Image: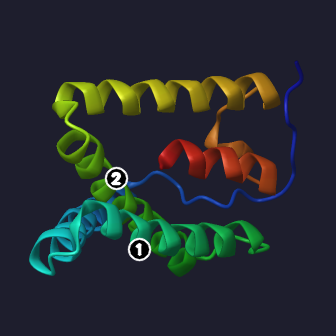
Amino acid sequence: MYRIVSTEASKVPAITLGFWVIKIFATTLGEVGGNAVTLTLGLGYLIGTAIFATVLIAAVSAQIRAKRFQPFLYWAAITATTLAGTTLADLVDRSLGIGYLGGSLSLFTMVMATLGLWYWSLGSVSVETVTSPKVEAFYWATIM
């Protein structure tokens, strides 16, 4: 295994109070927006997940292609993860019938597997190393 050493600037923001305030707003928007599409508009969890997964893929692809940290693009991608994540979690625990515990265990397993693969592939899971498309792909896969 090797360590990534980079002189490039990270493409993720510093973890500050402002970061957490914006993250809470993005998470709230994800919950409300996901429910608005799936429940209020009556599209259902599968269609809602497909819609937001499409938005997520577009936002994360644009973020990975960006040459430097762009706050608006980053937070758009974060918001897309909360929208897609909300509808996907609802689909898994409600429509597939595995409940909250089954859904939580499934998501936990996927996050741990992603972190393990990230570490095994690159030798670090530090956000300071998010400077290349490969590392950034692991970052976004873990967030999702």
Please provide percent x and percent y for residue 66: 74, 75
Give the class, few, some or many, for how many residues have Cα within 10 Å of label 2's Cα (few <14, many ≥20): many
Please provide percent x and percent y for residue 82: 35, 60
- Quadrant in the picture for residue 48: bottom left
Q: Which mark is residue 88?
A: 2
Please provide percent x and percent y for residue 84: 38, 61
Residue 18 seen in render: no
**Which is nearer the eye, 86 or 77?**
86
Label 2, label 1: how many angstroms apart (C-alpha)?
A: 11 Å
Local secondary structure at mark 2: helix
Residue at the spot of label 1:
51
Classify 109 as above or below 138: above
Q: Residue 119 carries which label?
A: none
Classify 47 as above or below 106: below
| Number of numbered discs | 2
**Which is nearer the eye, 125 or 112?**
112
Disc 1 marks which amino acid? Ile
- Quadrant in the picture for residue 9: bottom right
Local secondary structure at mark 1: helix
Residue ID at (60%, 58%): 12
- Quadrant in the picture for residue 41: bottom left
